[in-house]
Amino acid sequence: MANLENNGSGNEEIQVVAFKLRREEYGISILNVQEIKRLTDITRVPFTPDFIKGVMNLRGSVLPVIDLKKRLGLQEVPYTDNTRIVIVKVDDISIGMIVDAVTEVLTITEDHIDTTKAVSDGNERSESNKFISGIGNLDNRLVIMLNLNEIIGLNGEAK
Amino acid sequence: MDTNQYMEMFLEESREHLQSLNDCLLELEHNPEDTSILNEIFRSAHTIKGMSATMGFTKIAELTHEMENVLDLLRKEQLKADEDIVDTIFKCVDALEQMIENVANGGQEDSVDVVALVNKLSAIASGDPVAAPKPVVKAASSPVVAKSTFSIELTDIDRDVIHKAKVSGLQALHIMVTLAATCLLKSARSYMVMNALDELGDVIKSIPSVEDLEQEKFDHSFDIVIITSSESKPIEDAIMSISEIDAVEIEVIDLNSEETTVKAVENKAEVKAETVAKPATNKTAVPVQANHDKMHKSGQSVRVDIEKLDSLMNLVGELVINKTRLEQIGITHRITELVETIEQMDRVTTDLQSVVMKVRMVPVGQVFNRFPRMVRDLAKELNKEINLTVEGEETELDRTVIDEIGDPLVHLIRNSLDHGVEHPDDREAKGKPRTGEVGLIARHEGNNVIIMVTDDGKGVNPDLMRKKAVEKGMLTQEEVNNMDDAEAVRIVFMAGFSTADVVTDVSGRGVGMDVVRSKIEALGGVIDVETKIDEGSIFKIKLPLTLAIIQALLVKVQEEIYAIPLGSIDSTINITPDDIKTVQNKEVILLRGQIIPIIRLNNLLNVPQTQEKENEDIFIVVVHLGDRKAGIVVDNLIGQQEIVIKTLGKLLAGLKVISGATVLGNGQVALILDVGALMQ
């Protein structure tokens, strides 16, 4: 999504599922979201990176679940009633992501999404920066757009 | 006469007779004098002739008629069944097979050219084999091999066929397929290409010939001429969907301008092996299998897409999970009516499950029956005398396993022929019979199927293995010194290992055995080798009956539940901490006089400690892998249950110790332990 600005059609609207991680608001394209579930039993899987919480049962199929806060290097907080699992699908791989709360579905025009350069020049570590594809600005409400490919670790790093 | 309604019957019977022709011919080779075999061959040929004439397939009838003439002379002992004659008849059988398959696929019988064969046969019958020298015979399948430029040499016969096709609105395409340089099973890939093409049109020739393709007697590319109504693009797509294909070039053959015009399509698209490989192999494996399938089944049958069977299997799996869930509700809430109803349902689901399993089961004979021919051809090529014994063809295995087991077996058998069995002269020098014995044996063993490839050849020399492994830098001298002979022999399964000093066409590129091993392991099986120098080797493959539903023991470690496949469980025992002894700081127990190492799951899997153990009893699940045993320490035994195996998905693939997951009755996910990996 980083190159969305460059394709000329900057006024296209995209729909984004927005959710909270601690006090920040994040978003992913609605096209990647399969469903949103309440927290269920998660079975720990040994020998996996610690952001992988384990696996869950989604109507008979077994899906890996990651803790998105851990993945992004944010501090963990205990799960609450608002905690949700967002099931996303990227390139045929479905996974669940644990988020603090799902807020709403937003519509953002693409020219309201800034590149990550604005923040990366600051004190951000590049490690967590690669997970971010842009920042949506809706009347001063900032929605951090996530790069799901990196988060799922399709580039091999998760293993 | 409307012959359509008899078509199925004709095809089924023809295939049966062709199979029996193949079998009998192999026998005839060994006993050229045996008239009862000749009679059998004659009868089969005669039946095919009769049937095909009735059905109006004149070419098949013509060819079989000529075969009959020769066979009749053989039967009357006016001719001797020498190598040339048997070879020719084999070629006829191949041609017949091809014609029948063409007919079965809705094509025309005459897409296969039989003129040369017919000539050859009549020449033999008239006692003048010189009149039809070999090159003419080959003309049908492989004429002048000249593929320096991107065009193809055509014989007059080919031109004729192409011309006829043009008249009926079809076009002839010349396809040049280049396999990836890394491709290991070139013959399998070329077979898949042929199969894919067979569905799109009629392959009228290939360079090199189909036989040579099957024996991997080609470099990395081969040429095919196909008559089809299809455009170039779908053909190209079909071929590119097969994995390990590097490039496909297609040109339209235009007879008018003598120079074949290069009309289009050059595609050097790199195939991403991993993305394409999975669906492609699955899809292409279906028609391949189906062809084998057809040979054996008679009576009423329906061909079903394997994907439909898979989804049926999944649904049954879901049903089993839900049934277990209902059972638990019934038990917790003590609802008698519900429990009774569930018992009924239990019976039905159990039946349903076993029926679905049975539907997916196919006899290994389907894979095995291509080997006698392969061994014969290979033995000739290698100048070795080999007798292949096949046992237990009726042993049934899950379809998915059958589809995958062929290639590894081809490798093993080739290996036995090439590296195992010695040359007849060497054998004589060693005091063995000139003819080497190679065995292919399948049988049930508990919940597993064992397939063994045996030979009485020179065996695997453990010292040689050690030496080579060090030479190749795969292991250090110290490591090999610590290995006992059995372990040293297993070096053969390590990646990048080949002891053959001369790399032959047949095997020995040093990639074979570890590929075989990984394939078998991917199927949930194990492969092992027993060998004695100069007495022979036994390669033993152990495969699970099915890959979908297994019996497992559920165990509890702290709060976590794990499933251990029942097939690998020896027994469960209950001991006190005092029974655990240590040998060199390793914990062991004594079980019926046998020392067994123990594995503490909570340590190995880093299970979080949630409760102090109050009781002194320790539960141990004794598991075995081959002859080795180990005890797994668990906190509690939950019970035996049928579980549906689910994969953990791409993201978590390749985890050691965990082979998959299953959904329990309460909806919770339990991980399945990989006993093999645990014990390493």
Image (spheres, coloured by chain):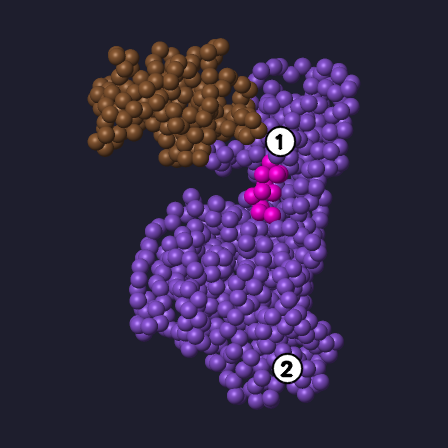
Image quadrant containing the C terminus of chain B: top right
The answer to whether residue B125 is seen in the rendering is yes
Residue bounds of the magenta highlight:
B304-314
Query: Do tag 2 and tag 1 residues touch (Cβ < 8 Å)?
Result: no
- Residue A33 vs residue B267: left or right? right
Residue that carries the numbered disc 1 in the rendered image: B318
At label 1, the amino acid type is Glu
Instruction: Please identify which colour was used for chain A in the image.
Output: brown
Q: On the same chain: label 2 and label 1?
A: yes
Mark nearer the N terminus (2 vs 1): 2
Name the residue: 43% across, 46% down.
Answer: B276
Q: Position of residue B530 (x, y in %)?
A: 63, 54
Label 1: chain? Answer: B
Which residue type does callout 2 highlight? Val
Q: On the picture, is B539 further left or further right than A102?
A: right
Residue underneath mark 2: B70
Closer-to-camera residue (B308/A20) = B308
Rendering coords of residue B296 (x, y %)? 66, 59
Name which quarter of the figure residue B633 lies in.
top right
Residue B370: within the magenta? Answer: no
Does the magenta stretch mainly form a helix, a strand or a loop?
A: helix
Residue at 41% x, 35% y is A91
Chain of the residue under label 2? B
Q: Which chain gets the purple colouring? A: B
Vertical placement of A107 versus B478: above or below? Answer: above
Image quarter of residue A25 = top left
